[in-house]
Image (cartoon, helix red, strand yellow):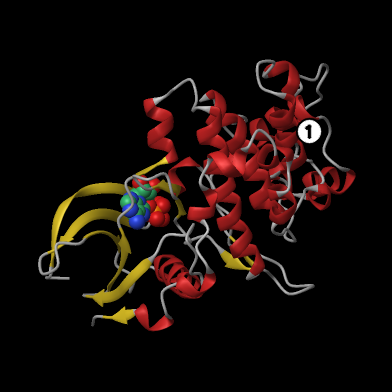
Amino acid sequence: MEKYEILGLVGEGSYGMVMKCRNKETGRVVAIKKFLESEDDKMVKKIAMREIKLLKQLRHENLVNLLEVCKKKKRWYLVFEFVDHTVLDDLEMFPNGLDYNKVRKYLYQIIKGIGFCHSHNIIHRDIKPENILVSCSGIIKLCDFGFARTLAAPGEAYTDYVATRWYRAPELLVGDIKYGKAVDVWAIGCLVTEMLTGEPLFPGDSDIDQLYHIMKSLGNLIPRHQELFYKNPLFAGVRLPEVKELDPLEKRYSKLSVTIIEFAKRCLQTDPDKRPSCSELLQSDLFNKDCFAESSNLQLLSRKPGLREPASFFRYIC
Ligand code: ADP
């Protein structure tokens, strides 16, 4: 790690911090994720190991590129290519939302990145504006694979899950232990309207409030989710909210086009089995009308598979 000089702090999470650094020999600017001490904290170790393992498998132009891994004095360090800013930064700069064509370009790449993870049976599980990096030339790179995990085998359940509430699908909120790729598609639905309006779609301040926001917009949960809610000890004594009058997306966002509303609603089906796959989303009118492909230079963005860095690109420096 001595070969890097610290330029500044770019992010801080529950399990460590991310610093902007420069390689003193090559001048290359990188982002170094420094985990908390992992010897005493099993969760930190688990998250670091999971992120390293998954990032080694996942090489794609829309996923952040891991350059080096190092362990020093009981701490893990992950060295990434440095990416200019995040979608959250964009939204802070434009609080009323981003330009329609920019949103389409971002979304297209976000879906490609997630679709690539899904094709490797990996769910990201924490898609949100601060985990979507944007390069100076507008290339999207998804980051933070600390919560990502491999799809459970049939009959196997996931247990250790905590992710950002606003982007959480109903199956996660009610505590369904069998969930799948559709949780990432839900998060895409939440992102679409937020990127276009600057307003988070379902900003719940507790899990029950989160469910209320969802039901107010989309109606009742599916029967399986209702049952799971009433069986979940975390909600003992709590009743599901009764929504008297729906506030559907088309009414709340009357200025957004039908194409956008339809796209968001497909991602936000309360029944996860009805949500489209990423490849189906890429076929949506949103990306196949108004000369999207021609105008967005996406031909340039989708590099040929052969151009990916070879596996040997990984170097362990300790
Ligand atoms: P944590 O798991 O601790 O939340 P993340 O991987 O989500 O860490 O990164 C936290 C923040 O650091 C991100 O929201 C982003 O602002 C910044 N960041 C992460 N990776 C990079 C990168 N490769 N280049 C630039 N900034 C990054």
Q: Is 132 positioned to the left or the right of 316 in the image? A: right
> Residue at coordinates 21% horizontally, 75% vertically from top-left?
73
Q: Residue at x 67, y 19 (%)?
A: 253
> Front-most of 103 and 172?
103
Q: Which residue is mark 1?
A: 240
Given residues 235 and 297, the one toward you in this image is 297
Where residue 108 appears, as percent x and y from the top left, is 59, 46
Foreground pick, 294 / 86 = 294
Residue 15's x, y, as percent? 37, 57
| Residue 54 image position (x, y, % from top left) | 50, 71
Q: Quadrant of residue 219?
A: top right
Compared across the picture, whether 256 is left or right of 312 comes to right
Snapshot quadrant of residue 199: top right
Up the image or down, 144 lies above or below 107; here it is: below
Which quarter shows the C terminus? bottom left
Q: How many marks?
A: 1
Give amino acid for label 1.
Leu
How packed is label 1: few (under 14 Cα within 10 Å), some, or many (20 or more)? Answer: some
* Quarter-of-image position of residue 285: top right
- What quarter of the picture does the N terminus occupy? bottom left
Is any atom of residue 139 visible in this view? yes
Instruction: Look at the numbered disc 1 and give the secondary structure of its residue.
Output: loop
Q: Is residue 200 visible?
A: no
Going 22% across and 75% down the picture, which residue do you hit? 72
Question: In the image, residue 248 lies at what x, y percent?
Answer: 76, 22
Q: Residue furthest right?
A: 223
Task: Respond yes or no on whether mark 1 lies under 8 Å from ligand 1.
Answer: no
- Residue 152, relative to residue 160: is it above or below? below
Q: Is residue 211 left or right of residue 316?
A: right
Residue pictured at 77% horizontal, 50% vertical:
276
Q: Nearer the viewer, residue 113 or 270?
A: 113
